[in-house]
């Protein structure tokens, strides 16, 4: 059975079904599927092996690896149009007498260059029954989040070492082409606009996206373009909101990815007891509890998960009082019918408890300082008069890690629109972070002022008044992107600051979206099917807190679905490491050229 259609993942799966699997469904015979690294990840995000079995796929293999021939079976190649993947295809049919498979159905994720196409034509054309481009060059990371397939995009966009090379233009073109495949998958031809600023990155990318959209939707020889749909694509550069990238977030997903060693969305934990086994859990949208909890504040999560566990245990009157992890493992043995449900809850309780132990030991003290610096006001709403006095206790505290001190220094610099050269040197020396000082200095390459200057004054986005909204004292900051999403939906973005690069901007139904806020809550996805879509793309990485905003705004404005994407997803540590590497020579950064 196919997975339930859920946002972007559902859209990608449906496109794969119609463009690839439906092509040979009538033949009613089993086939082998060949994937490369990109398409392996793509399929893992939007389907399971059981879904492929239902489509007649019996074996999935890696196109790069040496494989046993199966000459009586046909093979489907879902691959990227790169030299490495094409060579893998050609090797399978290099001579007719020793072909690995009966025939090949080739599906490229994107436009195949003539040089590669001609290479296939001259090598194994007779073995290929079908060759098609399906235009999916992005990853549907979550139901409303996408990331591009651009290795080392951050370095390529911002490094001064590439300033006089064609690398930056090339990476912008690749990004534009991949964003267009997202629009095509969603069947959107959006009005494209961007945030004007000190850098021309956003405007350049917006123009390239618009040009590529025109080319993609050109319908006939008369060069008529498919009409613009009632959607907007807004392109923003990472410098637009540096604060959200370094602040400690206390919502579940953002906090867990910041504080815990989660890699490839995999959380490792040990079971209770002296002989505790190490287990792994994948944090994904197939886990309904993860979807329910990921955007909640840690305080609510810590309260809610034990309640859910008690509900299960009370069905059998098996547990009384406070539930511990060891009591839960005993409960699972006695109640096998609830094992799957309980094991998910145990995973999330482990994550929450791991987060809280880190929070209590160090992070709690940091959070107040960070919030005061980010907002310029304290929890009582009083203006912070001396940012340095707020910062100093963090720098003098020996229990804080250097990464946390660097994050606090950056928040101080962002709040004061840069500092003096002398002050910066003193901060770096006193905190003994000379070897990591580029994590601070290199923000200038993102066009964020590090040294204050009258010439470079960063224009800050006018913030919405959220004083009436209920918040936790240590979570008062709201990512700037949430204001942008709400202003875009309500048609309040100033066209001087947010110009269109589209020739014919579509009518944006802002008023409809606003009135939808007063509607009673219904099935949000059904309500949005015929309405507008807002797509936000951030150059240089998106944070988990910004991803959360896309869901919150979609929930509040029923008539508009917000989809957010970037070159990659950031955690504060990953970002600081990437900022530090900007001044390294290209050969010391692992850029993969495909």
Image (spheres, rainbow, N blue to C red):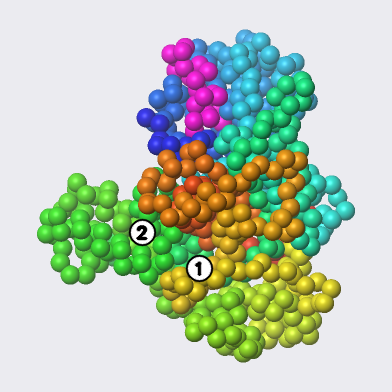
Secondary structure found at label 2: helix
- What residue did someone put label 1 on? 249
Disc 1 crowd rating (10 Å Cα; few below 14, some 14-19, many 20+) is: many
Instruction: Classify 79 as above or below 248.
Output: above
Pinpoint residue 562: horizontal percent, then vertical percent. 54, 49
- Asked if the stretch drawn in magenta spans residue 150, the answer is no
| Left or right of residue 442, residue 35 in this image | left
Pinpoint residue 323: horizontal percent, then vertical percent. 23, 66
**Residue in view at x 81 percent, y 60 percent:** 160
| Left or right of residue 423, residue 465 in this image | left
**Residue in view at x 40 percent, y 35 percent:** 3
Res 82 seen here: yes
Screen quadrant of the C terminus = top right
Relative to the observer, which residue lies in front, 466 or 286?
466
Instruction: Classify 70 as above or below 582.
Output: above
Pinpoint residue 386: horizontal percent, then vertical percent. 64, 89
Q: Tell me which segment is drawn in magenta.
A: 13-36
Earlier residue among tags 1 and 2: 1
- What residue did someone put label 2 on? 348
């Amino acid at each position: 059975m196919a997975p339930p259609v859920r946002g972007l993942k559902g859209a990608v799966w449906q496109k794969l079904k119609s463009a690839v699997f439906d092509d040979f469904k009538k033949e009613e015979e089993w086939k082998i599927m060949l994937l490369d690294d990109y398409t392996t990840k793509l399929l893992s995000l939007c389907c399971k092996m059981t879904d492929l079995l239902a489509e007649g796929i019996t074996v999935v293999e890696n196109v790069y690896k040496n494989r046993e021939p199966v000459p009586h079976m046909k093979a489907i190649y879902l691959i990227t149009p790169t030299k490495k993947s094409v060579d893998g295809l050609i090797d399978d049919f290099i001579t007719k007498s020793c072909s690995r498979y009966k025939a090949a159905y080739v599906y490229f994720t994107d436009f195949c260059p003539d040089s590669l196409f001609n290479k296939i034509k001259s090598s194994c054309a007779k073995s290929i029954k079908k060759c098609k481009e399906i235009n999916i060059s992005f990853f549907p990371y979550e139901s409303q989040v996408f990331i591009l397939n651009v290795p080392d995009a951050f370095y390529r966009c911002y490094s001064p070492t590439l300033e006089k090379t064609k690398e930056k233009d090339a990476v912008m073109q690749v990004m534009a082409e991949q964003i267009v495949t997202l629009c095509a998958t969603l069947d959107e031809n959006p009005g494209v606009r961007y945030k004007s600023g000190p850098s021309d990155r956003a405007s350049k990318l917006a123009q390239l996206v618009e040009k590529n959209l025109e080319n993609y939707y050109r319908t006939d020889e008369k060069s008529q373009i498919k009409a613009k749909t009632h959607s907007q694509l807004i392109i923003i550069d990472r410098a637009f909101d540096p604060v959200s990238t370094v602040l400690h977030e206390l919502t579940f997903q953002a906090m867990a990815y910041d504080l815990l060693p989660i890699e490839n969305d995999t959380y490792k934990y040990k079971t209770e007891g002296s002989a505790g086994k190490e287990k792994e859990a994948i944090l994904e949208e197939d886990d309904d509890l993860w979807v329910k909890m990921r955007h909640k504040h840690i305080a609510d999560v810590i309260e809610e998960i034990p309640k859910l566990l008690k509900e299960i245990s009370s069905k059998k009157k098996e547990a009384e009082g406070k539930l511990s992890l060891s009591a839960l493992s005993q409960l699972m043995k006695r109640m096998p019918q609830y094992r799957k449900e309980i094991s998910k809850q145990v995973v999330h309780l482990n994550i929450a408890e791991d987060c809280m132990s880190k929070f209590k030991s160090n992070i709690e003290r940091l959070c107040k300082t960070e919030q005061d610096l980010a907002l310029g006001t304290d929890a009582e709403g009083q203006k912070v008069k001396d940012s340095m006095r707020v910062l100093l206790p963090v720098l003098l505290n020996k229990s804080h890690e250097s990464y946390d001190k660097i994050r606090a220094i950056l928040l101080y610099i962002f709040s004061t629109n840069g500092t003096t050269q002398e002050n910066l040197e003193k901060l770096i020396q006193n905190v003994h972070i000379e070897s990591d000082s580029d994590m601070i200095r290199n923000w200038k390459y993102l066009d964020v002022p590090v040294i204050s200057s009258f010439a470079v004054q960063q224009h800050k986005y006018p913030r919405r008044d959220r004083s009436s909204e209920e918040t936790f004292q240590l979570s008062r900051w709201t990512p700037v992107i949430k204001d942008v999403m709400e202003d875009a939906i309500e048609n309040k973005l100033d066209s001087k600051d947010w110009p269109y690069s589209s020739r014919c901007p579509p009518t944006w139904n802002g008023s409809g979206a606003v009135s939808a806020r007063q509607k009673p809550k219904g099935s949000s996805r059904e309500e949005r099917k015929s309405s507008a879509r807002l797509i936000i793309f951030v150059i240089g990485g998106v944070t988990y807190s910004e991803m959360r905003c896309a869901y919150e705004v979609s929930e509040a404005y029923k008539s508009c679905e917000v989809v957010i994407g970037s070159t990659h997803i950031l955690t504060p540590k990953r970002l600081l490491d990437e900022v530090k590497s900007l001044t390294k020579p290209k050969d010391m950064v692992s850029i993969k050229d495909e």
